[in-house]
């Protein structure tokens, strides 16, 4: 394959996300034109890529599209759309479901709609664990649930595990959502404003948990409007505006020499 055998060729497996020329539109919306256009994204193992941009620039629909959660009427097209080396344009719903359950942890912007109102927080996180880890026995699962809840900064996790989403404050729900996203040690984490409703101390704790997963080899797509957070955790930054990439590069470069008024 190469005439330079000493070169380190990245393993295909290192590339978790490899997308080129992505467009996302909605039937009947935006005068028929796609909302996100010509979007490129790669995420490798052990890498955090931040997606920033003003409100309405298309960050959330892009994040959801990575898991085929764009919603009804979404029209998605791409020149290349590879997830873990597989062509996602040919995925069936069962492939997507498997991906969402095992490979990818997802933290959506709105914790209340993302958590199941009919299950306790402990059941929610426990289900992720029993489905994707070789944990045996209820005690083991319960102990691990408590560990994960404590890790994301939920005080008194034994008690909280028995509560439902509506019994928790916004900040605790947000942490419960993060707990269920990281419980199974996913390869890829997509986090859409994961710390927005959290106070500074808990925010730091949650970011440290995400950063630890990245050090352990996971890829992280972090959507945030907080450039201090981005500077602290991201390897690369992509700046979006009106559904397009207007700037991208190494975090320090993009934040130090912003080419676009938004980043400035
Ligand atoms: N289901 C949908 N149908 C039509 N337009 C949508 C839909 N979802 C989002 N949009 C539009 O896409 C644009 C980008 O939204 P979004 O990705 O949520 O922005 P961001 O997360 O960057 O604030 C917005 O103008 C929004 O109105
Ligand atoms: Mg958003």
Image: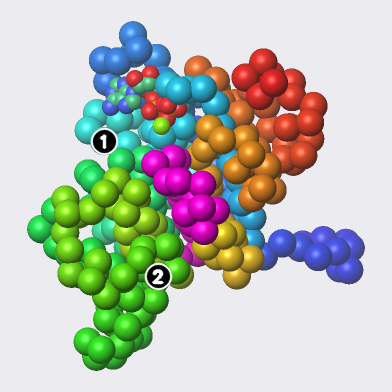
Q: Residue tagged by mark 2?
A: 150
Pick the front one: 14 or 171: 171
Q: Where is residue 211 in the image (x, y as percent from the top left)?
A: 59, 59
Q: Is mark 1 within 8 Å of ligand 1?
A: yes
Q: In which quarter of the image is residue 124?
A: bottom left
- The structure residue drawn at horizontal position 31% and vertical position 70%, both measured from the top left corner, is 156
Is residue 78 at all visible to an observer of this figure? yes
Q: Within the magenta stretch, is there residue 78? A: no
Q: In this view, does 88 lie to the left or right of 256?
A: left
> Mark 1 highlights which residue?
71
Q: In which quarter of the image is residue 250?
A: top right
Query: Looking at the image, which residue sits at the far top?
Result: 31
Foreground residue among 22 and 127: 127
Measuring 32% from the left and 59% from the top, which residue is drawn there? 176
Residue located at (29% from left, 46% from top): 170
Give x and y (percent) for residue 7. 85, 64
**Camera sees residue 100:** no
- Graded by Cα atoms within 10 Å as few (under 14), some (14 to 19) or many (20 or more), the crowding at tag 1 reads few
Total marks in image: 2
- Ligand 1's quadrant is top left
Disc 2 and disc 1 in contact, CB within 8 angstroms:
no
Q: Does the magenta stretch include residue 201?
A: yes
Few, some or many residues within 10 Å of mark 2 (<14, 14–19, 20+): some
User: From the viewer's perspective, is residue 31 above or below residue 57?
Assistant: above
Query: Which quadrant does the C terminus fall into?
Result: top right
Say what secondary structure mark 2 lies in.
Answer: helix
Q: What stretch is highlighted in magenta?
A: 186-206
Indicate left or right for 137 with 109 as reference.
left
């Amino acid at each position: 394959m190469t005439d330079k055998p000493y070169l380190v060729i990245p393993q295909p497996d290192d590339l978790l996300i490899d997308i080129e020329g992505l467009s996302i539109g909605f039937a009947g919306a935006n005068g028929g034109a796609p909302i996100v256009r010509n979007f490129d994204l790669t995420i490798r193992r052990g890498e955090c890529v931040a997606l920033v941009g003003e409100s309405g620039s298309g960050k959330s629909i892009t994040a959801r599209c990575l898991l085929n959660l764009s919603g009804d009427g979404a029209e998605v097209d791409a020149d290349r759309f590879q997830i873990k080396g597989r062509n996602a344009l040919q995925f069936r719903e069962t492939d997507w479901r498997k991906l969402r359950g095992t490979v990818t942890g997802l933290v959506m912007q709105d914790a209340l709609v993302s958590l199941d109102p009919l299950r306790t927080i402990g059941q929610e996180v426990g289900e992720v664990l029993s489905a994707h880890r070789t944990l045996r026995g209820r005690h083991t699962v319960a102990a691990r649930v408590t560990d994960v809840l404590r890790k994301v900064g939920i005080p008194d996790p034994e008690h909280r595990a028995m509560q439902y989403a509506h019994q928790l404050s916004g900040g605790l729900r947000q942490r419960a959502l993060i707990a269920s996203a990281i419980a199974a040690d996913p390869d890829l984490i997509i986090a859409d404003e994961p710390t927005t409703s959290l106070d500074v101390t808990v925010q730091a704790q949650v970011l440290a948990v995400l950063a630890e997963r990245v050090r352990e080899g996971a890829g992280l797509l972090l959507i945030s409007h907080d450039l201090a957070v981005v500077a602290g955790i991201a390897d690369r930054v992509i700046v979006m505006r009106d559904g397009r990439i207007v700037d991208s590069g190494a975090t320090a470069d993009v934040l130090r020499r912003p080419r676009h008024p938004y980043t400035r």
